[in-house]
Every structure is written in C-alpha cells, then in structure tokens.
Image (cartoon, rainbow, N blue to C red):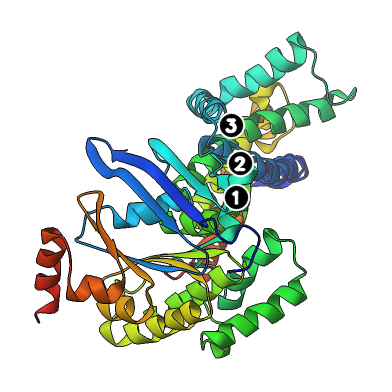
Amino acid sequence: MDDLIKYAPDLAAGFLVNVKIALVCAVISLVLGTVLVSFRVSPTPVLRAAGTVYVNVVRNTPLTLVLAFSALGLSDTIGLTFSEEPSTNGFWLVVLGLSAYTATFVGEALRSGINTVPLGQAEAARAIGLTFLQSLRLIILPQAFRAVIGPLGSVMIAMIKNTTVALAAGYLADSAFVMKDTFDDTGVSIPIFIGLVLAFMAVTLPVGFFTGWLSRRLAVVR
Amino acid sequence: MTEAGGSSPLVKLEAVNKHFGTLHVLKDIDLSVARGEVVVVIGPSGGGKSTLCRVINRLEAIDSGGITFDGQALPAEGKALAQLRSEVGMVFQSFNLFSHKTILENVTLGPIKVRGIARQQAEQRGLELLERVGIASQAAKYPAQLSGGQQQRVAIARALAMDPKMILFDEPTSALDPEMVQEVLDVMVGLASDGMTMLVVTHEMGFARRAADRVVFMADGQIVEESEPEAFFTQPKSDRARDFLSKILTH
C-alpha cells in the first residue's frame, strides 16, 4: 500500500496519458470508421474493394504490430513526424496506429447496423431524389448508429484498454509502462496493480452504462 | 393538355425486358402514359406489375429496351438519375417512411435537401400537404405512432412535396387493414381528379373503375390487355383476363 501511495503521482500522470490517447482515438476512429463503412457499402467497386482490403488487413493484424509499424515503418523509415519533440511525436504515432486499428472495428459494427435498416428506407430515400451520399448520411447511417450504440460502446472500451500497449510504438509514458518501470524498483506490488485496474474500471464502466442507456433511449421504433 | 410537348407521352417504355436470374419478369413491354392520365395495372401476383412500376424510376435496372421520361432517356446513374427520381413520386406497399424522422420531417426532407428550399417554406408547404391528406395534427409524431392508413397518406404527402410530374403507386393498399383502405383510396381519387399523372399497381377494382383512364392487365411478364375500365371489367377480350376477373369478382 505504501508503494501505491508513493508512486501514485507518477502512475496518475501515466494514466492521464492513457485517457488523452483514448479521447483523441475515440474521435478519430469514429470518423475514420464511418468513412470506412461508406467505402464498404459504396456503389463504386474500387472503393468497396479498398474498404474490404483495409479492414481485413488491419483488423487481423495484432495491435502491437500495427503500433510497431506506425513507429518503425511510418516514422523511422518513411520519415513521418508529427513533432520535433520526441514525446509529442510518440503520442501521435500511438494515436495514429490505435485509431487506424480501432476504426476497422467501428466500421464493422456500423456495417452490421446498416444491415438492420430495412431496404425500403434506402429505396424511399433514392425515390425522393437523394444521392447515394445523402441517403447514407441522412437516412441510413443515423439509423445504423442507433442500432449499434451498444456494440460501439464495447469497441470503445476495448480501445481504452488498448491504450496500454502504447509502449509497442516506443512511447514510454502511459500507466502500464510506469507500472512496469515501478516494478523494476519495488518488485511486483499488488496494490499498485489493483489501483491501476480500478482506475481503468472507473473509466470503462461508465462508458458501458452510458452507451447502454443511450441505445435504449435512441432506439428507432419501427 | 396544353403544356409544352403535351401531345408526347410522359413515360414511354419500348420493348423493355427484365430478368431476375432465370426468371423473365418483363417480356417486351411497350407502354406509354400520357400527361394527366391515370393508368391502373392489375393482374395475378408474380406477373411483373411491381417490377414494371419500379423500372420507371430505375429502382430496378432493365436488361434491354428503352424508357423515356418527359422526352429524355432514363439516366443510368449519378446526379441525373437522382434528378429524375425527384420528378417521379413513389408510394410503396410498405410505406417506407423514414423511421427516425417525424412526420413533418419526412415530408420536408426532399424539398430541403434535394430542391434546396428554405426550411420555413418547406415546413409551411409540408403542413399544407399533411392538411390535404388529413394528418396535419400528427405532424410532430414518428411514423411508428401512426396507423398504416395514416402512414400511407403521409407517404403520399411526401411524394407530393416534391411537386412530381408523376406518381407511381406500388400496391399502396395491400399492406393495410381493410378498414384503412378507403381513406388511402380517397386521397388517390382526389389526386386523380386534380389531374396528377399516375401509374397504380393495385388489386382494388373499385378504384380502377372509379379513377382509371385505362386498365392494363399483366400476366406472366406480358401486357395481355389494355382498355378502358368499363370495357375491361364488363367485356374482357382475353381468356386470361376473363379467368382472372371471374376469380376475383364472383364473391
């Protein structure tokens, strides 16, 4: 218990990094996932193929490898840098990899949501003269989102926990890294371990409750 | 009819063929609909009636033949197709009102997003149309809160909101409880007498007799017979039509 109190400021700072990564990734992955699903249901075969290949490659690659690619491939080899400051650069490389990865799950959740929208909705949208993008944006996606708020909550919870593999991108700042680093000094400390678990649950449990409540509230009555 | 090109038909189908896999649903269909004309399509189920309706605004693409609307060949895709569809109203068997939008939003969405009309103006016109079909008091509700007959009347108002040159009705009363059929037919008869061009696929023989200028009898993907309603119901020319009528009119 003394260890937990002693190292609490470091751990808290690390946990704040996890929260920051999660917040930015939530926004980017939801946007990117929506773009991806638009590709996958597009009438243009090239876009459909691009969406399918992207989802199947990235979704089936272990996250640690995606992050390693983000750091070693994109940053070191190709030279993609977000900032001269190494820690800022590391933060954005993690965000990039984790968002690219999470977006595939968002896209697939949305695609199953689209399947719950009756075909007649799309036909009616086309029949009044809406273009493909308009009917997607105004009619199909709003109903699809409401149908999969619960599953999207699960994707977000998984993403929040996935922020702990940030060190795979060489970004040594998040709480999981701080914990391991601390254990090097103190040996394994059960209180630190449990403290960190509770911190994550304090974030993820409300996400689950909130999305559950929201999905009931916004359910589309047919 | 006095509009420009008034003598040319509004819709013209020539030698139209359509297959669903191995099923030949439309066989060399020739049909034209004049401006202001009300054409009722009747016939046994599976005869291609709905498909005929759906190829006119290209919800189904045809395999061969040609369709012109208002003198222009039907566009295949993109903006031009969306433009065409905005001029052809469609009323579906299962209503297909946008479930997540209110009744008023259902009626104003097209005018605002497709025609670019200001919201306030679109809402005013939307309420007028809802008034016309007798649903104005329900404007703030969602589709699932309305009865089938009310939903279908909203669907008609939604089509009218686009000021279409024509409205296609694909079995508009088939999914309704019997007591709600009349309220929808009344609205349709009103439209017909106001001069709207209509193509109506229906099993409602009473409507055909009252409102149709012409009855088209379809069976097995072909137009078997076309005539004025009175002539068709009293003296059908083909055996197929006689057979069909004897089954539905005797009880």
Residue B240: where, in percent of width, then height?
A: 13, 59
Dot 2: chain letter: B
Marks 1 and 2 in Cβ contact (< 8 Å): yes
Amino acid found under the numbered disc labelled 2? Gly
Q: Visible in this render: residue B146?
A: no
Identity, as a three-letter code, of the amino acid under mark 3: Tyr
Other residues around mark 3 within 10 Å, as few (<14) / some (14–19) / many (≥20)? many
Q: Position of residue A219 (x, y in %)?
A: 48, 67
Residue bearing mark 2: B78
Q: Secondary structure at mark 1?
A: helix
Q: Residue at x 79, y 18 (%)?
A: A80
Towards the viewer: B156 or B191: B191
| Labels 3, 1: one chain | no
Query: Label 2: how many residues lie within 10 Å, few (<14), some (14-19) or many (20+)?
Result: few
Q: Position of residue B198 (x, y in %)?
A: 45, 67
Helix, strand or loop at label 2? It is: helix
Instruction: Name the residue type under label 1.
Output: Ala
- Height in image: B133 above or below A33? below
Residue at 53% x, 53% y: name it: A126
Numbered label attached to residue B82: 1
Which image quadrant: the N terminus of chain B?
A: bottom right
User: What's the residue at 83%, 21% (across, down)?
Assistant: A81
C-alpha span from label 2 to label 3: 33 Å
Q: Is residue A152 above or below residue B28?
A: below
Give the labeled residue for mark 3: A101
